[in-house]
Structures are given as C-alpha cells and as structure tokens.
Amino acid sequence: MRTASYVIFWALIASVVIALITLPISLQAHLIAGTIVVGAMIVLKFLRPHGVWRLIALGLGTAIVLRYIYWRTTSTLPPVNQIEDFVPGLLVYLAELYNIGMLGLSLFVVAMPLPRRETPPIDLSDAPAVDVFVPSYNEEPQLLATTLAAALAMDYPAGRLKVYLLDDGGTDEKCNVDNFVAASAARERRATLQALCEGLGVVYLTRERNISAKAGNLNNGIAHSEGELIVVFDADHAPARSFLTETVGFFGRDPKLFLVQTPHFFINPDPLERNLKTFRTMPSENEMFYGIIQRGLDKWDASFFCGSAAVLRRTALQATNGFSGRSITEDAETAITLHATGWHSVYVDKPLIAGLQPATFASFIGQRSRWAQGMMQILLYHRPMFKRGLSLPQRLCYSSSALFWLFPFARLIFLVAPLFYLFFGLEIFTASGPEFLAYVLSYMAVNLMMQNYLYGRYRWPWISELYEFIQSVYLLPAVVSVLLNPGKPTFKVTAKNESLETRRVSELGRPFFIIFAILSLGVVATYWRIVAQPYNADTTLVVGLWNILNLLMAGCALGVVSERPEGRAARRFDVKRRGEITIDGLSAPIVTENVSVDGIGIRVMSRDFHKVPVGSLGQASFETTVDMPRGTLPLRIVRVAPDEKGLLLGCHYQPSTPLHSRIIADLAFSDAENWSRFQYARRHNPGVIYGTARFLRLAIFQTSRGISYLFGLYRLSRSASRTGAAE
C-alpha cells in the first residue's frame, strides 16, 4: 500500500511538471518566468544554499532546462526535406541532448553529496598487514626514492608494513631484447633500483614479461606478497605519514569493503594552470572530481578506484582474479567489477598524497587520451547501465563517469555550428532572433546557476568549457578509434618530472591557431551579413555572438598552448624545522621556511653567511619526525636573499644515498594539513557574474599572449634561418 502511494504521488508530480513544461505561453511570459526562476535561485543561493532549499533551487532550474528542450524539440528543428539544414541542425540538437542528459546525471550524483567521513580508529593490537605497491616503468630513480621513502615513513605498527617496488622497466623481457642498447639500459636500471631498494629496506620485484601493462604488474605483486590490505601509489605519488591511519580503520567496520580511495593532490600546476598562471588562486581541474563528484559517487556506493592513493582488500581482488586488465584504465574497470559482485567502497575526502601532473601540453593530452579511451572501453565492454549486479544508482553513476568522455563530439559541434549560418547561410535553428535570445539566454543563465550550485567552490564559470575545448581536438580521434576498434588502445605511461626551460608554442598547438583564424573569419562574415542582409540582422547578431563566445574560448586556448618556462617545478609549503648548515667549514643554526620535493628555503641564524656565493655546496641536518639514522643532506645554494629578519638561502637538494631520500621525504611529506590548507585557500566561489567577467578578461589577455608567442617565435626562426644562410 505504501509503495503504491509513493508511485501515485510521484506520478502526480510528474504529470504536473509535464503540464507546466508543455504549457503554451507567450515569449514575454517565458522571459518573465525565466527571470523569476533565476532571481529565486540567486536568493536561495544566498539565504538557503544547503539542504532541501538547495534541491528546490535545482528543481526550479531543471524546469527551465526541460522547458527549453521541449521548445527545441517541437519548434526549432529544420524540416527534414531541407537536408542541408536538417543534418547540421540535428547534430546541434543531439549535442544539446547529450549536454542536458549529462546535466541530469550530474544532478543525480552530486545534488546532495556525502559530507566528509569521520576517520575510524585502527585496532593497533590487531592491525591488518599492509603491502604497499609502487608500480614503475621508466621513472627516474630519485623520483622513486622519494616516493618509497615517504611510504616507509607512514605511521603504522612495526612489522605490519612492507613496501614493494614493482619494476616493469627491468623485466626479463626488457633485459634480453635484441636491441643491445635497450637491453643494457634495462639491466642498468634493474641494478640501480635493486641497490636503491636494498638501501631503503624495500622489496624489489620484477617479472618475466610486460603483460597487461600496469594491471599485470600489480597482479604480479599480489602473487608475491601476503598482506591483508594492498596500498597502491603511483611512482610520483608520495604519501603523508598519516595516510594509513586515515584509511585502514574503515576496513574494520565493513568486511565487504574492497576500497578506500583518497584524492590525488598535485604540488605542481598542469599546463593550463602554469600557462594561465591560475595555480595559486583557482581550484585545480581535478578538485571538482575529488572534491565533490567522488563524494557524490560515495553516497551511492559508487566511488571508484583511481589507480593510486588507495587501499584495497586482497581477498576482494583475489575473488575477481586481481586487477582487471582488459581496458587501459585498470582502476575503474577493477572497481566496476567488484561493485557488481557485491563489494563496497569508501571515499576519504582529504589529500593524503602529493603527486606530479604532466608539465607539458603534449603529455597532458596523452594522459587524457588514455583516460578517455579507457572509459570508452569500459562503456563498450561492461555497459554500465545494464551491468548485472550493480544497483540502479551505481549504474547511473558509472554511466555518468563513462559517458562524460563523449564530450569532444558535443564541444566541436558547438564550435562549428554558428559557422554553418555565417559562412553558408544554413538555418540550423528555425527561430527568430528574439525567440532564440529568450529561450537560449534563460537556459544559459539557469545552466550557469545550476553549475554554480553544484560546483561553485570547486570549478569557476567557463573553466570546464575551456578544459573540454583544449582536449576535444585531440580526444575526438582518440575516442572514435576506440568506438571503431575497442581493443586497439595500448597503455602508455604518462611522462613525469618533465621541465620547460624556454617559452615555446606546444608541438600540439597548431590546430588551435587555425581554429582561431577560422572563427575570426566568422566575425568578418557576421559583419558582412548584417550589411548585406539587414532583414536578418537579429538572427545574424545572435549567431555572431555565439561565434564570438567560441572565439574567446579559442583565444584563451592559445594561451594554454603557449607554454611558459617553469620557475619552481613544485609548490613549496611552510615547514618549520630546526637544524644546522655547514658551508666551507663554516657552521650555523638554521630554521626551515618552506619545503618542496626539489628544494628548501632556509633562514640562517648567523651574519657570517652573507657572503656565501650562489652555487656553493653545503651539508644540512634537520630535526626529523620519524626514527632514522643521523645524517646530513647535501644542498646547493641557488639564491641568497638578505632581508629584515636576516638571511634566507634558497637551496636545491643534491641527494646521492637512500638516507638523503628519507630526509627529503620527512621534510616534504610529513604533514598532510599543509596540502589541505593550500586547497581551502583556493576554494572560494566567485559567483556567475564575477566569474564570467574574470574569464572574459583572462581570454582577452591570453589571446594577445598566444598571438605574440606565435609571431615572436616566427621572427626568431626567420632570424635563425637567415643567420644560417649567411654562414
């Protein structure tokens, strides 16, 4: 009886909503309704941004969105017999349906995400044995040394933690290839890493052949270890000391828990953040996913494994034959397999590792191409919406995560759509200018408000569109290749520890300059049509404004592909430790000011160091937070800066032994609260109006910077060619 009442109630609600959406009203009435809804959403945002009022605001916005799509479906599609108009018009309509469908899935996932979980204590008398896996392929030994040292320093009962380096760059297959140079390099790598692991007290593990890429490497680790829990860290993901104390306790609460996932926090900017200089002030791209989407997924028991910074239960992995290796995103595939067999997951919303992002635009695109292709494989192989064993909410969550990567189709359709009219006179909308403005403006305003409700502190207005735009050009062929041949993609390791020493236009930048030039011609075409066809001026102005919005996005992309040289490779965080430094036989007490993975700022408590030359080498000792042998860390002085407090030395590490790596790890990764404070400092909501104004200012500046890069480098290359010819 109760179930029947619920069905009747929701059926009545749906009937009322459908009636309101399909109610024929005048253009003026629609404008008034849209204005009232936007105003109500703004008021609720300021007065009642949480709880049921948040849902009411999102419901009001959804009504306008549905009203818009009803209008688009019934009133704006070109006639089928005008095929030259109908085909591009249908493509734009389908792209809009995709966007609205993704908005609906997003509302389901993150309308009311779970709050941050409380950390359960660990039973120290019966703490589960933990094996830490650090899979590696071609990373530098020093990068691995820092991660391994940080893993060893994690707080956990003695004798219950073992760290493994899983080396896929020194397999028997690689050491015995026919290419003598490659074989020699693999043998040298194996010997170097074996010595490193021996010095640190880490287990070195490799295998015969490189089968199934990262998944196969992890499964080889499972076969040669015994711990109840398995922790996975990428080679460049160094954990804080508190990682295990914040995660392991959850496994004692739920015997069917297979995963505790934590965020991926990065201490260096991605190419967009570095080239647009937004890293210190704007939330990073991945914060929307780790800050709110994963919490939304967690509400529906659908937070999934992200390849690193996670703890997994061995028995769960063994029940499904280890990590899945059919797709090139073994992490999400493993999670959907285990969720479908009745296992549960938990997401801990606290940064507990510090990693490195791709430094160059080319590496960034390579990484995202792998993610897109892998999620397309999961969409095709596992069909999340129909996957047996998943609950309906889990099916919707996994479908949302996989379908998201189809965005290149919609993004590029929206890019070229206005050009169909401006260049060729094709009418892909059968609507007047006032109708277009009334419906589209109210829809866009409500859409921006809804995004601000969902992601305001984590993603600023228009930034998602920019990230999608810069990826779409290269992700579209990558996604199409998987749709045509799902088994074609192969796992490619993301480049790490790259550096940029000179300004340049990315080797992948050319398409963006071509797109910018074509859209600029669209502005010229807009002016020509207004002059030549004044009777269509209203429609031309509306389509021209659409093209100008695309032009601003393309101009901002020019700044993204115009790569700046790096300053510091990684963000420095305030760390206060006492110690002593010795340079050329002269010693003095010191206090650390800031620390990163590659360098340290030191305040010297002595006047005798003011004449220390840049480039000097020294030895420093520091207080440590973990037990380790006493020792000093070699430093090279790169900056000497007297100030009102005395003398500040900027130093780069010069590590050469495992002990040096342990000291660096203790300095840089002991306190996860530094990372949380940095994130919170960037997480503020600028609002739709200010955020839009900020984006416009950014786009105009980056357009000019990108064009200046292009012409500057062109003049430089011409000058170089003339010099070469003269010689």
Image: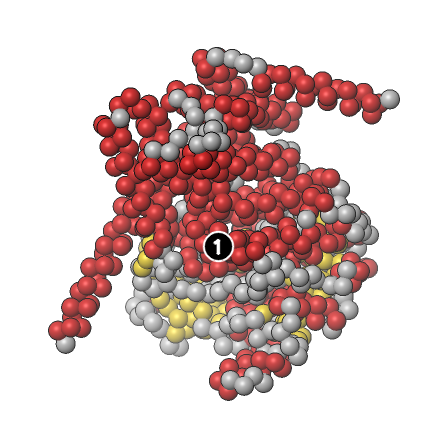
Q: Is residue 8 left or right of residue 39?
A: right
- Residue 661 place in picture, x, y as percent: 54, 70
Quarter of the image where the N terminus is located: top right
Q: Quadrant of the C terminus?
A: bottom left
Question: Residue drawn at (63%, 19%), measured in percent from left and top?
Answer: 17
Counting other residues with Cα less than 10 Å from the Cα at mark 1, is it few (<14), some (14-19), or many (20 or more)?
some
- Describe residue 723's horizontal placement relative to residue 208 as left or right: left
Residue tagged by mark 1? 477
Does the image show residue 249?
no
Identity, as a three-letter code, of the amino acid under mark 1? Pro
**267 or 706, which is in the foreground?**
706
For label 1, the SS is helix
Vertical comparison of 13 with 507: above or below? above
Residue 325 % position (x, y) = 67, 63
At x 80%, y 60%, the residue is 319
Q: Position of residue 617 (x, y in %)?
A: 39, 74
In this view, the residue in front, 653 or 493, is 493
Name of the residue lying farthest toward the left? 726
Residue 698 position by quadrant: top left
Q: Nearer the viewer, residue 519 or 423?
A: 423
Residue at the spot 48% in from the left edge and 12% down from the top edge: 26
Q: Is residue 545 left or right of residue 463?
A: left
Who's the residue at 31% across and 59% down the image? 503
**Relative height, residue 175 to residue 717 (above, below):** below
Residue closest to the far front:
81
